Every structure is written in C-alpha cells, then in structure tokens.
Image (spheres, grey):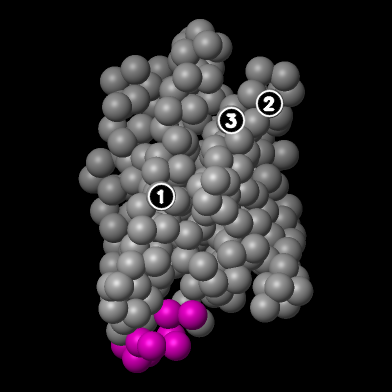
Amino acid sequence: MDVNLIKGFLALISAVSGASSTFLIKLNHKKLCGLISFSAGALLGAAVFVLLPEAGESLRFYEVLISGLSGYLLFWFISKYFSHVCPACSASHFDEQTTHKFSEIVLTLITALSIHSLLDGMALSTGINNESILAAILTHKFPEGLALAALMLSSNYPKPKIFLYVTLVESTTVIGSIVGTYLFQSKISPVILDAIMAHIAGGFVYLAIHAVLGEMLKNHTRLVIFSFSLGLILIFGVHLIFS
C-alpha cells in the first residue's frame, strides 16, 4: 500500500477515534477549547514551518502570498456563505439554535467539511518533510471528528448513524491523499505544485486563526494561548528532527 494512502487512513482513524470518544467521555467546554487550540497551533506550524517555505523554493514572494491568500479566501468564502468548513474550528459558533437546525444544514456542513478534508489529504501527499504535516493533521482530525459527532449527538442522531457520517465525510481525506499522490508525482510544473502547497497552507492558516480567535474572544484566553503555543512547538520540534 502506498505510504501516502496509509497516512490518509491514519487521519481517518484519528477523526473516527475523536468521534468515538464523544460516546465514551463527556468533555467540558474548557477541555474542548484546549484541544481545538492545540490542533490549531499544529496546523499553523505545518503551514509556516513546512508548506510555505517549501513553496518559496520556486515561487516569488508575491506568488506565495497570492497562492496562500487564495486558500485562505476559499475557506473564508465557504464558511461565510455556505457552511462552517470545520466543526472543530467553529465550535463556538455552534450555538443551541444551530444544533437544533442541524438536520437542515447537515448536507452543506458535510460538503464543506469534505472540501476541507480533501485538501488535508492532498497536504499529506506533498512529499516534503511529511512527518510534520502528518503530525499536524492527525492532531487536528481528532477534535474535528469529535466536534462533528458531538453536534450530531446533540441533534439526537443515533450513534450508528453518527459513526457512519463521520467515517464517510472523513474518508475524503483518503481520496485527497490519492489525488495528491497523483499530482505531486506527475510531470506537472514544480511552480504549479508549489502554488498548490501554498494554497493548502492558506487554508491551514484560516483554520488556525479562525479557531483561536473564535475561542479567545469568548472563553479561556490563557488556556487557548498556552495550548496553541504547544501545538506550534510540537510541529516545530518535529520539523527540526526530520528536516
């Protein structure tokens, strides 16, 4: 089995494990904030320490900036006009009214999350210092699966259906790893491939900033900053070890 495909399945397992923990452990909001902030720091670390520097090897600064901004704006647009692109990053936005209307927004939410997961899978297949990216995505997938499952559980979905939904939507990460493997091993220009990496990094930056600001403006500021910093340090450490 291709190593990138294995990484895609590991990400899927992380998300499903997060969903399963919803049935076993009752997390309070403070602990959830810490977990989400930690994973947000890991995503930002993957973007800043790995993807963007690698893209800068063949792209000019303004090209990296434009490509990264395109990824950021894509997630911003989806979240603003379609549905939250990441249930974990948007945890504070899922109020009681949203939960009760989940059955009405489930399709749009799952579609948006599938796009996010597809890009996660592609990031796993870049072939550059993949340990850092893998660590960041595995860290993020757990609270992502947990948040989606918790939202469905609060909307009175049966547990088998929750497990099925989370598995299906997170399976797009595996699809993304297959697509990414084809792209990054193809004869496509390195400039285009680096632009794709910067685009993915822009999406990671959006998720990290949106998650942290969403929680810091409302709750547990010190915990959020501490957990976010730990996530950054984790990826920086992994990057130093394997680079």
Residue beneath disc 1: 178
The x, y position of residue 221, in whole percent, is: 67, 55
Mark 3–mark 1 CB contact (< 8 Å): no
114 over 54 or under it: above or below: above
In the displayed structure, does residue 178 sit left or right of residue 133? left
In the displayed structure, does residue 179 sit left or right of residue 51? left
Classify mark 3: helix, strand or loop.
helix
Looking at the image, which residue sits at the far left? 81
Residue beneath disc 2: 21
Looking at the image, which residue sits at the far front? 1
Q: Which mark is residue 37?
A: none
The x, y position of residue 18, in whole percent, is: 63, 32
The x, y position of residue 189, in whole percent, is: 28, 78
Q: Identify the residue at horizontal 29%, vertical 58% (top origin).
A: 74
Label 1: few (<14), some (14–19) or many (≥20) C-alpha neighbours in 10 Å: many
Q: Which of the 4 image quadrants contains residue 199?
A: bottom left
Q: Tell me if residue 187 can be seen.
A: yes
Residue beneath disc 3: 16
Amino acid at circle 3 = Val
Classify mark 1: helix, strand or loop.
helix
Which sits in the foreground, 107 or 81?
A: 107
Label 3: few (<14), some (14–19) or many (≥20) C-alpha neighbours in 10 Å: many
The part of the chain drawn in magenta is: 54-62
Label 2 or label 3, whichever lies nearer to me, is 3
177 over 83 or under it: above or below: below
In the displayed structure, does residue 94 sit left or right of residue 63? right
Residue 59 included in the magenta stretch of the image:
yes
Q: Identify the residue at horizontal 46%, vertical 36% (top origin).
A: 170
Q: Mark 3 or mark 2, which is nearer the start of the sequence?
A: 3
